[in-house]
Image: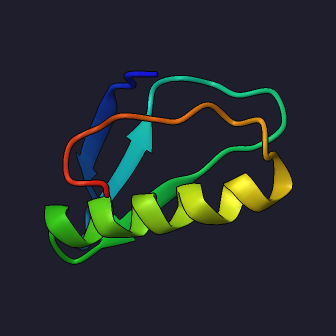
Amino acid sequence: MKVQVVIEKNIDGTYTAVIKNQFKNVGFFGNGTTVEEAMDDLCQSESEARKFDPNLPVLEYENCD
């Protein structure tokens, strides 16, 4: 499932990566000092979310293995 990722630059200069899609049982996002770190954190959050909802569809977005 392809999802759109929104990157937000915070007041303190850090970045937050959130997906636009909503899922019934879980939510996740990523934070970092760079866009790349925020995307990596988002990928880790997805992995953690899968523990709570094993039926979460396989997601496709850039920079996430």
Q: What residue lies at 66% left-to-right and 66% top-to-bottom? A: 48
Q: What residue lies at 36% left-to-right and 34% top-to-bottom? A: 60
Quadrant of res 25: top right
Image location (x, y in percent) of residue 4:
33, 26
Query: In the image, is residue 53 above or below residue 14?
Result: above
Query: In the image, is residue 61 above or below residue 65?
Result: above
Q: Is residue 34 left or right of residue 24?
A: left
The C terminus appears in which quarter of the rendering?
bottom left
Q: Is residue 25 visible?
A: yes
Q: What residue lies at 26% left-to-right and 63% top-to-bottom? A: 11
Q: Is residue 13 visible?
A: no
Q: How many numbered marks does the figure carry?
A: 0
Query: In the image, is residue 14 above or below residue 57?
Result: below
Quadrant of res 19: top left
What is the residue that sits farthest to the bottom in this orientation?
A: 33
Q: What's the image's color scheme?
A: rainbow
Image location (x, y in percent) of residue 42:
43, 59
Along the viewing direction, whichever of 35 and 62 lies nearer the viewer: 62
Image location (x, y in percent) of residue 53:
81, 46
Along the viewing direction, whichever of 53 and 5 lies nearer the viewer: 53
Quadrant of res 22: top right
Along the viewing direction, whichever of 46 and 6 lies nearer the viewer: 46
Q: What residue lies at 42% left-to-right and 60% top-to-bottom? A: 43
